Amino acid sequence: MLLVAAIGMTAAGVSAYLIQRERVLARIDDRLASTVEGLQCIADGCDGSERPASVLDFLGQAMTRVLPDHNESTLGLIDGRPRLRPSSGISFRLEDDPEFIARVVDEADADHVVRGTAATEFGALRYAIIPVRIQDDAADGLYVSAYDLDAALSEITEAFRTYWFVAAGALVIVGLVGWFVSGRILHPLRTLRRAAAGIGEDDLTTRIDARGTDDVSDLSRAFNAMLDRLQRSFDAQRRLLDDVSHELRTPITIVRGHLELLDPDDPSDVADTRELAIDELDRMNVLVDDIALLVKTSRPDFLERAPVDVAELTEQVLTKASALSARHEWRLGERAHVVAMLDATRITQAWLQLAENAAKYAPAGTTVELGSRLAPSDGDGEVLELSVHDDGPGIPQEKLDWVFDRFARAEVGRGVAGSGLGLAIVAAIAAGHGGRAYAQNSEGAGARVVIAVPYDTEGEPDAAHPGR
């Protein structure tokens, strides 16, 4: 930053100096041109005066009538020797520098005005050599006008020198401010680096103190949110491993215990133990399949959405669910006559899981109702509710909040058998659609379990919207 600022200040200062210098030199050249015009006027007698009769007379009138400008000196030479000069009003005398006089004589042209710049003992001079020839006079005359460039440029040189002091001070201030600001900006990044380096498999508790509204603070908050997600993921993975190990330990213990007590000489005991072991292995296989399916629900390609006629899907699920149990009366409730973007296969799987739970634990002869409807959401828009309502004993009120957790089983006759992952899979499928699954007890008897997903249309729904 300092280097760029220094380059920018240098470029600006040098450019300004060169531009001002060229302007000063242009003004000096204009003044030298005016001097030539004034001398021509004297030679032609344009102001009503008599024309000079000799070179000496011309140079005398020039020294009298053409007054030197500020920082200017003039000199009249005849036959290469200094003869005339202004009596006053000059800050330096050209005849005091013999080398400059010799240069003027060498560069002089009898027919043209010669201009140039020379380094002299007075400093840099910008000069003009004007030849003077008078008819009937054999003498060769030269009128020399020279400007002291150092004096003429002194103001902009001093301004440029002041500019350098100011620029140097500005660079120091920029450096101090930049050091302070960059230190504050980079401090969260250094904290972020230390936090990232200190994260281990067993410690995800490190967080960064994010304050302010700048980009670095936003980055710190995003990093903290990432750590929160990682910690939740690791905690969920740890709980899954703990739950799986606990659930697998039961059938293994049962099989091992029966094998240890097995009487190999008793055919009936062998047959019973074999049947029990196969049954427990089948239960373990179901558990492993459910775990594999639950893991798949976190993958981005788990769902394949397409436009689905919800009313038709409701009837299809009811037809499939009625084959789960002949001991219950299956009934179609209200239907949402809409087209929604759903993964019909996964929604059917989750819906049938709810129906299977109802068929298992609702008393025989009771009614199980499947239905769908559009309901207002907490925010803008509507949600699509896919529900199963039974007349069973319901769910204890204190356990409604966690019946969809992995391996959760409510008491009072619900969820006693199975892997304990069915409702967790239902909740995962609902979450994959951007919704949720929940359960509530009815006012009379039984429970209503719902898959609620945001209503996303594809095409136009029926105009009448029956069943809402």
Image: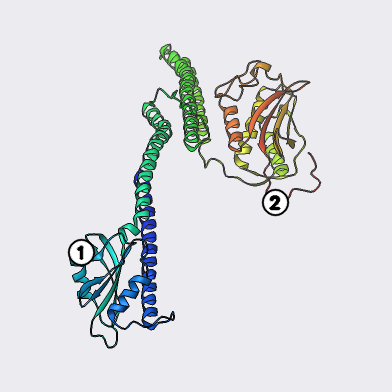
Amino acid on which the number 2 mark rests in the picture: Gly
Image coordinates of residue 18 in percent, x first then y, are 36, 59
Label 2 sits on a secondary structure element that is: loop
Is residue 267 visible in the rendered image? The answer is no
Image coordinates of residue 20 in percent, x first then y, are 39, 59
In this view, the residue farthest toward the bottom is 136
Q: Quadrant location of residue 130?
A: bottom left
The one nearer the camera, 227 or 159, is 159
Label 1 sits on a secondary structure element that is: loop
Q: Do labels 1 and 2 touch, CB within 8 Å?
A: no
Is 460 on the left-hand or right-hand side of 33? right
Q: Residue at x 77, y 36 (%)?
A: 334
Amino acid on which the number 1 mark rests in the picture: Asp
Q: Residues within 10 Å of mark 2 (few under 14, many from 20)?
A: few
> Which part of the image, by quadrant, shows the C terminus?
top right
Q: Which residue is mark 2?
A: 459
Is 336 on the left-hand or right-hand side of 423? right
Is 197 on the left-hand or right-hand side of 271? left
Q: Which residue is mark 1?
A: 97
The one nearer the camera, 163 or 126, is 126
Is 322 on the left-hand or right-hand side of 423? right
Q: Residue at x 75, y 24 (%)?
A: 366
